[in-house]
Image (cartoon, helix red, strand yellow):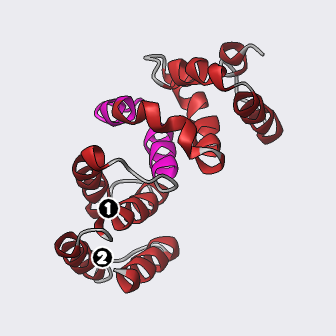
Amino acid sequence: MNIEAILSIRNSKKDIHLLVDYIIENPSSIERLMRCFFSKELRTCQYAAWPLGILGSRKPQMLYPYIEQMITHLKTPKHNAVIRNTLRTWQEMEIPEKYEGLIFEICFSYLVDPNYAIAIRAFSIAVASNIASKYPDLAQELKAELLNQLNYPQSAGIKYRLKKYSAIL
């Protein structure tokens, strides 16, 4: 399968799921997907984000070798799809301890910034909460911010996550 060619054009949901199935069945092909995801070319990077998010939901363990690159990639994301799908994968993963602090900070910054898209903020709440749940002091800090965020106008999706995760922490 020519992953690069598939990701050079906009695809249907069916095509993307077929691509993800192929990558799961041929694990060595993930390198080609990740090369596209980390591409400096806007459209290639954007189009690779969707299958990455699906892959992260279905087989998050396949993405563990790329966590550090994903963190670096978030410093200058080419598109919101990169942020959104990176966070989508992280909410399904057990984040390695050496990355927890940095990923928590990244997610916290997205959470408190109302200029980010709803999905980015929602996934940030989940990822930050998953990390904070292991550390009581961090959990209290995050819970306070989640409750604080309820004082501001929020979408229904954000309100739901703020309430859900503040109750869990």
- x and y, in percent, of residue 72 in the image: 30, 31
Per the image, label 2 sits on a secondary structure element best described as helix
Left or right, 23 with respect to 128, comes to right
Per the image, label 1 sits on a secondary structure element best described as helix
Viewer-closest of 123 and 11: 123
Left or right, 99 with respect to 158, comes to left
How many numbered marks, from 0 up? 2
- x and y, in percent, of residue 30 in the image: 60, 25
Residue at horizontal 40 percent and vertical 77 percent from the top: 165
Magenta highlight on residue 79: yes
Residue at horizontal 77 percent and vertical 28 percent from the top: 22
Q: Which residues are magenta?
A: 69-90
Q: Which mark is residue 111?
A: 1
Cβ–Cβ below 8 Å for labels 2 and 1? yes
Residue at horizontal 45 percent and vertical 63 percent from the top: 122
Chief SS of the magenta region: helix
Viewer-closest of 40 and 20: 20
Q: Amino acid at mark 2?
A: Leu
Mark 2–mark 1 Cα distance, whole angstroms, equals 9 Å
Return the residue at label 2.
146
